[in-house]
Amino acid sequence: MAGKQTPRQKMINLMYLVFIAMMAMQVDRQVLRSFEGITVTLDDSSKLTADNNKTFYEQIVKKAGEDPDYAAIQVKAEQVKSESNKVFDVIEGIKKSIMDEQKYKLPDFGAGDEVETNYNSLQNVDVITKLLFAKQDTPTAKGAELKKAIDDYKTFMAGAYAESARDKKRVEHIFSTGDRGRKSWLNDQFYDQPMVAGLANLTKIQSDIRTEEGNLVRTLLANKLQDEIELKAFQPIVMVPPIMRAGKPVEASIAFGAFDNTLQGSVSVGGQNVALKDGKAVFNITPTGSGMKTVSGTMTYKANGKDISMPFSQQYEVVAETLPLPPSGAVISADAMNVVYRFLDNPISATVNGAEGAVSLTASVGGLSGGNGKWNFKPGAGSNTVKFTASAKTSSGKVVSGSKDFRIKPVPPARGVILGKTNITVPANGIAAQTVKVDWPDFLFDMSATVTSFKVKVPGQPTTSVTGTTIGAAASKAKKGDAVFIFDIKYRSSTGITGESSPITIEVR
């Protein structure tokens, strides 16, 4: 049986109770500080991602100023920026209202213990509940505005990824506002929540917005660069004899310049469909009458799931069985393609109909060499077109000549690849050993190049510049589920051409 406690024993018991209360308070404060630290980290991550996104927006604006084809991409990018800022600002306004009400300011990243934590504000459960809820299951106008802004953004982003089921599923999952069990999303995330938890949830959504904004803008830019490589590498080549005899069938063909014999497509000539086989459509022409004739139509092939159509047109001359007069004009053709490429040796052939003896060839700009019907033309910087003129003497001694204009184009930009692919999946511990390379798919000339530098972007981390070809430690903080972006890939080709390739995406598994 317990006896009556002495004053000393009573004091010991009281101190023990006070000690237990202080320990409980300390645990609560550690939880509050942890939530505050998470919120500060997410806020800083949003700022870093926004700065990185700014770089991609600037690249698109720059390219739109250099190439009108980027105007449509710039319009889409501006829409992405506008929609992202719209929902981000709605959330930022709610956060400001909450913090102003409590006279609380979120500490700067890295401040540590230098800033005293306002625990009373962090644990307040009334301020966010009153702002977003009229009662538990009924949101205020501000609560409804928050949910609608997120739902609208989800709809916009899902629509932007209409052709990518994987990306669409991701954004619908990240920005889902569906019910959580028996609770609505808004109730689950914010009702009766301490202010610090509400701030953390809101800041997490903002971080997701900036991340997905960057993912979409990078996709727009990457797809456009890929289109340049794929679409500008093809040109219709019409192969029709320039002179035909009336009533005698001849064979003509049309092909894609630098063509891929696996291409699937169709050709229409004069309203008649011609089957495409091994990258070419072969058909017969039976000329009638005399004089200049034209063969024309449309070539169509698929790229990135879309039908790409290009018109073609070629003239030919129909003559009688005998030629009462020496033929006039010349035939000039590029051995490799319909255009000549800057800083490359482009093989050129030239013949003159009815000529006997050597054919001479001149070019309106420098870079022509060779002879005996075969020349090389290596244009430098400057002109965008070149006029070739071929001439020779006929058996009667008459000089006949002809000219033709060719376009001078830069070599298409290279494609950035790792292990021969533009998009690969690699475990986190295998990224460092990957080597960044470039190639020119479907380009007729043999090209090789060495990567000199590139940039690496890991979600939530600053962009890292790398000199050389190996990724190394630049992506050391990448984790499973991240999409590591390799961009601004600079290279020097075997012919001395320098340029920037299309980007590469690494999915971390």
Image (cartoon, rainbow, N blue to C red):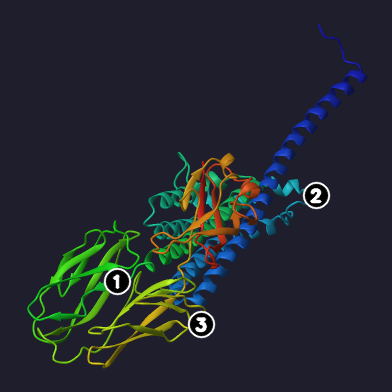
Local SS, label 2: loop
Q: Is residue 41 left or right of residue 486?
A: right
Q: Position of residue 364 (x, y in %)?
A: 43, 87
Q: Amino acid at mark 2?
A: Glu
| Residue 38 versus residue 151 in the image, above or below | above
Q: Quadrant of residue 333?
A: bottom left
Q: Earlier in the sequence, mark 1 or mark 2?
A: 2
Q: Is residue 141 visible?
A: no
Residues 235 and 448: in front is 448
Q: Amino acid at mark 3?
A: Gly
Question: How far apart are the two marked residues, 1 and 2, measured between alpha carbons?
Answer: 71 Å
Q: Which residue is mark 3?
A: 382
How many marks the image carries: the answer is 3
The residue drawn where x is 42% and y is 67% is 228
| Residue 444 versus residue 310 in the image, above or below | above
Q: Which residue is mark 1?
A: 236
Local SS, label 3: loop
- For mark 3, does the 10 Å Cα neighbourhood hold few (<14), some (14 to 19), or many (20 or more) residues? few
Local SS, label 1: strand
Q: Quadrant of residue 468?
A: bottom right
Q: Which residue is mark 2?
A: 116
- For mark 1, does the 10 Å Cα neighbourhood hold few (<14), some (14 to 19), or many (20 or more) residues? some
Residues 158 and 125: in front is 158
